[in-house]
Amino acid sequence: MNKLTKFEKYLTKEISIEFKACLYFYSILFFYSMVLILQGTYSVSILTMAEMIFAAYVICYIQMFVFHNFDEADRLGGIELLGIIVCTGIYTGLSYILKWFQRRTDITVYFTLFMIFTYICVCFINKAKRKIDSKELNNLLYEYKKRNGEQVL
């Protein structure tokens, strides 16, 4: 088997961060949009959206390099829960400082709960996807061995 080159490892991490940043940005934007709609506002601030996507990228780098990609862990243990708390805290702090929700405490608390829920859902979705991918790879290996007349367990 060929090992991944340094560039391939770097590229894999960058693609993962890009995907996560888009996912979390979309989640935050959804929450933000629902808050605005409930307040009777039907347009969003481009500056606020830029702040949100920039925050998502920075926090995804923190997730990847400080908390060891916690949202792709097999279980939610110590470092994973700490990662959820810290990253949610950063999002919450930024939302308050940057006035995403006009510094309304009630909405900020809902946003915090929403982000915790989002992280937990993403963890479970990633775990389910890995399980499905493993099953598919095992099926492919089984079919390959069967076609090539190898011992199939």
Image (tube, rainbow, N blue to C red):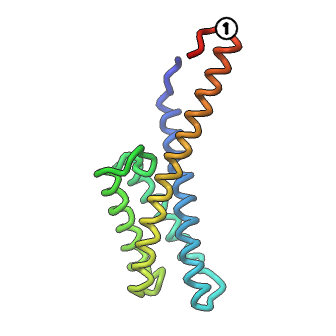
Residue 7 in picture, x, y percent from top left:
51, 33
Give the camera-side residue of 145 and 126. Answer: 145
Direction from residue 131 to residue 61 in the image, left or right:
left
Q: Residues within 10 Å of mark 1 (few under 14, many from 20)?
A: few
Among all residues in the image, which is located at the extreme bottom? 40
Residue ID at (35%, 52%): 80
In which image quadrant can residue 62 be found? bottom left
Residue assigned mark 1: 149
Among all residues in the image, which is located at the extreme right? 147
* Number of numbered discs on residues: 1
Residue ID at (41%, 73%): 112
Residue ID at (35%, 68%): 89
Direction from residue 40 to residue 17 in the image, left or right:
left
Q: Compared to 4, does 132 lie above or below?
A: below
Residue 75 in picture, x, y percent from top left:
38, 47
In which image quadrant can residue 132 be found? top right
Among all residues in the image, which is located at the extreme front? 153
Give the camera-side residue of 69 and 47. Answer: 69
Give the camera-side residue of 67 and 62. Answer: 67
In which image quadrant can residue 117 be found? bottom left
Give the camera-side residue of 126 and 62. Answer: 126
Direction from residue 78 to residue 102 in the image, left or right:
right
Where does the C terminus fall, quadrant-wise? Answer: top right
- What's under tag 1, amino acid-wise? Gly
Among all residues in the image, which is located at the extreme left? 78
Residue ID at (54%, 77%): 32
Residue 16 in picture, x, y percent from top left:
52, 46
Residue 72 in picture, x, y percent from top left:
45, 47
Label 1: element kind: loop
Q: Compared to 12, does 117 lie above or below?
A: below
